[in-house]
Image (cartoon, rainbow, N blue to C red):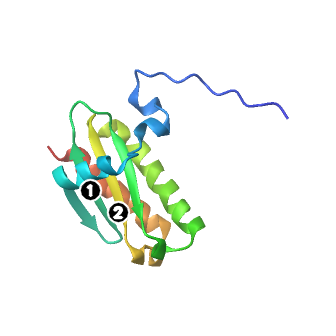
Amino acid sequence: MPARATPPLDPDQPEHLPPRERRLRTPQMYKRVFETGRALRSAPLTVRYARLAPERTRVGFIIRKRSGNAPLRNAIRRMLRQCFFDALPALSEGTWVIFDVPERASRFTRTEMRAQAVNLLAAIAESP
């Protein structure tokens, strides 16, 4: 079976950066958002964000184990990551976003969670 060729990445276009370059990776990054940022809440989600001007737009996730088993948590993370990448062109550069998923998230459908994530990201994009 032949390997699929992937198109080269253009580092000048933020929407084409590899996902690793868009993640919050250290506890200090999360702490920075919690200390300097704001929070938006809607039914199953809380989104915390901070605008850090010289930085690259990044995303992080807090999903508790009581939210469900590992495949469910991973599916939620994949869905939220896709929502973030879809909203990336509208977000100002330097915005760090954390999706905080509570324990009761398993009671909501992915469609409901996706709709709330899109609404919250749109509100972040519109805020000054």
Instruction: Point out the image quarter for the C terminus.
Output: top left
The image shows residue 14 at horizontal and vertical percentages of 39, 30
Q: Residue at x 44, y 55 (%)?
A: 80
Name the residue rendered at 48%, 21% in the picture. 10
User: Is residue 110 positioned above or below 97 on the image?
Assistant: below
Give the quarter of the image for residue 58: top left
Label 1 secondary element: strand
Location of residue 119 in the rendering, given as x and y in whole percent from the top left corner: 31, 57
Mark 2 lies on residue: 100
- Crowd class of label 2 (few under 14; some 14 to 19; many from 20; radius 10 Å): some
Left or right, 52 with respect to 68, comes to left
Which quadrant of the view contains residue 51?
top left
Quadrant where the N terminus lies? top right
Q: Nearer the viewer, residue 95 or 28?
A: 28
Q: Which mark is residue 106?
A: none
Q: Residues within 10 Å of mark 1 (few under 14, many from 20)?
A: many
Looking at the image, which residue is at 26% across and 56% down?
48
- Residues at discs 2 and 1 in contact (Cβ within 8 Å): yes
Q: Amino acid at mark 2?
A: Asp
How far from the left and from the top, in percent, is residue 72?
Answer: 55, 68
Give the numbered dot on residue 48. Answer: 1
**Where residue 50 appears, x then y in whole percent?**
22, 47
Residue situated in front as seen by the camera: 121 or 37: 37
Measured Cα–Cα span from mark 2 to mark 1: 8 Å
Chain-order first, disc 2 or disc 1:
1
- The amino acid marked with disc number 1 is Arg
